Image (cartoon, rainbow, N blue to C red):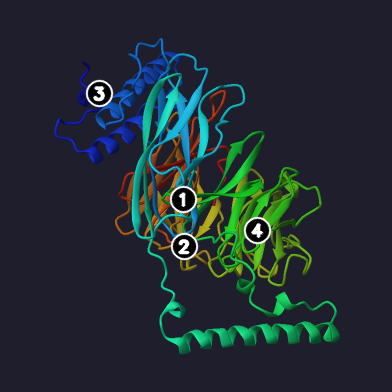
């Protein structure tokens, strides 16, 4: 018998949680997509196969049905534990399960639930790649509508590939039902509630009779709170991520908590989504390249643009009053701003900078990056001057254009309090005041895409390896100036609004079928894998 403890590099006394933690670390280390050489890739696939078998044996989910000699299917499911956390009574929650096969060909895939069949349901499996049978994605739904509040449920999903099975644990805690004070035994409180209800009905009827006389365009729902008519389609939280998962032939938009414990399909196809918690709206690019706005209160979406111009880099102002994006390409690229404070159709979009002042000479190219100030009143952006770039700032109304840097620099980013800026340059990352004063070099690495965390404690940036073959993600603790590399092959990252969580995407984009993996990280703690994503853009 193989020494499975040795394969996972854990002691015989290792707890189940220690085994699970080590398993996740080894999966990240030996994932085949991290290797370029064909021999190394094959060795990693074989190593990963043994790691998966060892984990499933030691965690009590041993593969049953036949010996693992390469002539039979070898089912592998991730994550090995589907933990739904605490779910509100009477509601539903969904998790994604990926099933792969590391053995011989499979003709039949079956998923079976243990325990109460009313609690969990699973969708039909969907291929991640159209020309490959595996891996498959399944949406696992927990439905608590007919289950008792304040109870815990555990079970498993049995994954069966032609009679060879493995198990995935299920864990769910149903929350405590809210107290209904009107249901107590005090008749006066009950009658008072009914009295209020009658008054609301009478008031609504009176408004329905009077308002058409006042204005035919004025409707009742504009006066009364929306909450009286419907619950929100989705509530965007400060630490939610927005990203796309490839489904069929189009990318589907998902929203989820930064810990990866909750994923919600928004029911639309799109990419490059950005959300505004202040407005509870999501802006995204549709399949036609135009921008759409999804209202999370109603679940309705409608187009914002119709001009046919290429668009990139969507970003909400911090207060949600404006949406900006880059329009055009090359020398024609400019920042377009929509003022949405009074609705999608109010006001016309305008571009920044509107003109090049006579005092600013040598502008040879368009804008290729911009960033909102924390108060939403100023925008940083890059302009090409000959073969170099310079960082400028401009008021959101188009006034007060000011050049901040006088050396080759780009990708300006604001500090959390708006009093400082960081920029990239060939000689490293520099910090300067919001007016361009007090220039200080923070690193000697020619980092890309630097950004402060919203709490001001951390600075993250991307950097190329010495050979230029890989792009790595670094995090710097501002107080100590200590820099730590947190990821290889990182293609994009973003801080959560709370400032203590970093979301990032890794990939080996040079492979024939590049895979993108979405991770979250709290500085100083191990990263957590959230999902395999089709589009590396997220917010």
- Residue assigned mark 3: 7
Judging from the image, what secondary structure is the residue with disc 3 in?
helix
Q: Nearer the viewer, mark 3 or mark 4?
A: 4
- Residue assigned mark 2: 415
Q: Residues within 10 Å of mark 1 (few under 14, many from 20)?
A: many
- Residue assigned mark 4: 299
Closer to the camera in the image, 358 or 449? 449
How far apart are labels 4 and 1 at the CA level?
Answer: 18 Å
Relative vertical location of residue 392 with respect to residue 399 in this rendering, above or below: above
Query: Residue 231, image x and y in percent?
Result: 59, 65
Q: Name the residue located 35 percent from the left edge and 60 percent from the top edge.
A: 150
Confirm whether residue 362 shows in the render: no
- Residue assigned mark 1: 262
Relative vertical location of residue 326 with respect to residue 36 in this rendering, above or below: below
The answer to whether marks 2 and 3 mark residues whose Cβ atoms lie closer than 8 Å is no
Q: Nearer the viewer, mark 1 or mark 2?
A: 1
Closer to the camera in the image, 523 or 3? 3
Judging from the image, what secondary structure is the residue with disc 4 in?
loop
How far apart are labels 2 and 3 at the CA level?
Answer: 46 Å
Query: Residue 353, image x and y in percent?
Result: 71, 60
């Amino acid at each position: 018998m193989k020494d499975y403890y040795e394969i996972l590099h854990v002691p015989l006394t290792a707890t189940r949680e220690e085994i699970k933690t080590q398993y996740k670390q080894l999966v990240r280390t030996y994932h085949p997509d991290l290797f370029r050489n064909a021999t190394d890739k094959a060795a990693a696939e074989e190593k990963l196969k043994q790691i998966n078998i060892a984990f499933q044996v030691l965690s009590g989910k041993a593969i049953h049905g036949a010996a693992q000699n390469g002539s039979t299917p070898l089912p592998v499911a991730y994550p090995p534990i589907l933990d739904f956390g605490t779910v509100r009574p009477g509601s539903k929650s969904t998790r994604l399960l990926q099933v792969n096969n590391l053995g011989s060909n499979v003709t039949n895939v079956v998923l079976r639930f243990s325990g109460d069949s009313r609690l969990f349901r699973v969708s039909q499996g969907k291929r991640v790649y159209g020309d490959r049978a595996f891996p498959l994605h399944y949406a696992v739904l927990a439905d608590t509508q007919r289950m008792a509040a304040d109870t815990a449920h555990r079970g498993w999903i049995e994954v069966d590939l032609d009679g060879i099975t493995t198990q995935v644990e299920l864990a769910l805690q149903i929350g405590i039902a809210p107290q209904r004070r009107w249901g107590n035994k005090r008749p006066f409180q009950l009658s008072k509630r009914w009295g209020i209800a009658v008054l609301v009905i009478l008031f609504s009827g009176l408004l329905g009779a009077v308002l058409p006389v006042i204005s035919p365009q004025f409707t009742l729902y504009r006066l009364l709170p929306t909450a009286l008519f419907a619950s929100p389609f989705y509530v965007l939280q400060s630490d939610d991520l927005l990203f796309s998962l490839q489904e069929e032939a189009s990318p589907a938009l998902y929203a989820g908590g930064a810990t990866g414990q909750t994923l919600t399909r928004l029911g639309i196809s799109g990419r490059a989504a950005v959300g505004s918690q202040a407005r509870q709206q999501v802006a995204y690019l549709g399949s036609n390249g135009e921008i759409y706005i999804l209202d999370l209160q109603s679940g309705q979406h409608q187009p914002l643009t119709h001009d046919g111009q290429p668009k990139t880099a969507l970003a909400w102002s911090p207060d949600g009053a404006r949406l900006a994006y880059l329009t055009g390409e090359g020398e024609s690229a400019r920042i377009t701003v929509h003022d949405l404070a009074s609705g999608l159709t109010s006001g016309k979009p305008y571009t920044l900078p509107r003109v090049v002042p006579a005092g600013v000479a040598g502008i040879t190219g368009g804008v290729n990056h911009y960033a909102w100030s924390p108060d939403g009143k100023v925008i940083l952006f890059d302009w090409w001057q000959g073969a170099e770039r310079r960082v400028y700032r401009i008021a959101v109304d188009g006034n007060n254009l000011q050049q901040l840097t006088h050396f080759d620099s780009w990708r300006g980013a604001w500090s959390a309090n708006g009093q400082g800026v960081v920029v990239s340059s060939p000689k490293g990352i520099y910090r300067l005041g919001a007016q361009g004063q007090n220039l200080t070099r923070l690193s000697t690495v020619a980092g890309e895409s630097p950004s402060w965390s919203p709490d001001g404690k951390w600075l993250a940036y991307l950097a190329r390896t010495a050979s230029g073959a890989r792009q790595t993600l670094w995090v710097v603790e501002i107080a100590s100036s200590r820099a730590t590399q947190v990821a290889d092959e990182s293609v994009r990252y973003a801080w959560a609004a709370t400032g203590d969580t970093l979301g990032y995407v890794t990939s080996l984009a040079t492979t024939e079928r590049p895979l993108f993996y979405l991770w979250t990280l709290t500085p100083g703690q191990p990263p957590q894998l959230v999902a395999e994503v089709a589009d590396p853009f997220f917010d």
